[in-house]
Amino acid sequence: MNEKSLYTSPYDDNEYKWLLDNIAKHFELDLRGYKQHRVRRRIDMIMRKYSYKDYKTYFNDLKKDPKKWDEFLDKLTINVTEFFRNPEKWEYLKKNVLPRLMKESGSKTKLWSAGCSTGEEPYTLSIILEELKAPKTIKVMATDLDKFVIAKAKRGVYSSRSLVNISEDLKNKYFKKVGPDSYEVSPIIKSRVVFKQHNLLMDPFEKNLDLIVCRNVVIYFDMEAKNGLYKNFAASLRKGGVLFVGSTERIFNYRSLGLEVIEPFFYQKVSD
């Protein structure tokens, strides 16, 4: 089944291409590498909500009305996550990966949570760093395209659903109950995470990273964008560094990127 057959839009196809080109040019947001049936369906839903007849009229309003642009960003991003998602993988990271990386890089160990969404992933990393008694100088760089989820991540308040994989011991140590079903991450965990906005398809990547965690993000990209992203991740790792991906994601051409599999969903850089 090709991608076009997954969704049929009531709007003009050529004008849709024009919309994507102009969003990339005007807002520096390139959506062309994402799976288009997902992107277009979401855009069309907003347009139908306001009874737009065509993409050009909608784009003109996006340029003029910041609230409409904020809504566009909010609807186009996918933010479903939880702490310690796939707990056995985080246990492997804690026992086998981070201790080695910190032994090799010491207090300068560089960690990146790419596509961090509402913060559960980088805060999970921060909890592990605390449990390993890592030097306070080791921070987690956490990035996402969506400024709204970054704002939520900085607040660090979550429902019990997000904490389903966290033991009572860790919950008591690193969270404070602030409402009937609200838990705030402790200041010590927050202090290790540095959030910033970043577009994985357009912005430059840092170099000489020890660990990149990018889980359940790449599944929304088409094959060309996916391959480019994995290539950039591999280039950003130092030799010996590790890329940790989601449990539905596999890098089939990992050898050509200078990577090797050290455990399912963990790729170590072995050559440039």
Image (tube, rainbow, N blue to C red):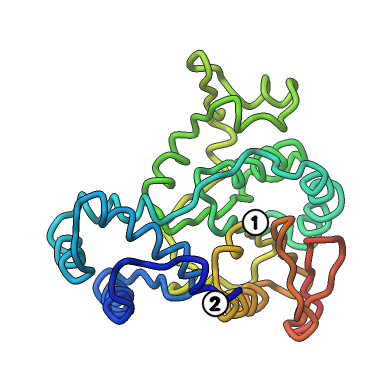
Residue drawn at the location 51% of the way across and 13% of the way down = 180
Q: Residue furthest left?
A: 64
Which residue lies under the disc numbered 2?
Answer: 225
Residue drawn at the location 84% of the way across and 61% of the way down = 264
SS state under label 1: loop
Residue drawn at the location 56% of the way across and 28% of the way down = 186
SS state under label 2: helix
Q: Is residue 176 above or below residue 1?
A: above
Q: Is residue 120 left or right of residue 165?
A: left
Residue 268, x across and y down, in percent: 79, 69
Question: At label 1, which amino acid type do we have?
Answer: Arg
Residue drawn at the location 58% of the way across and 41% of the way down = 120
Q: Is residue 65 left or right of residue 200?
A: left
Circle on res. 215: 1
Dot 1, how many residues are within 10 Å of its Cα: few (below 14), some (14-19), or many (20+)?
many
Q: Is residue 91 above or below residue 165?
A: below
Query: Which quadrant: the N terminus?
Result: bottom right
- Corner quadrant of residue 159: top right
- Corner quadrant of residue 208: bottom right
Residue 104, x across and y down, in percent: 79, 62
Task: Out of 98 and 156, give the one closest to the viewer.
Answer: 156
Cα distance between the residues tagged 2 and 1: 15 Å
Residue 185, x across and y down, in percent: 55, 30
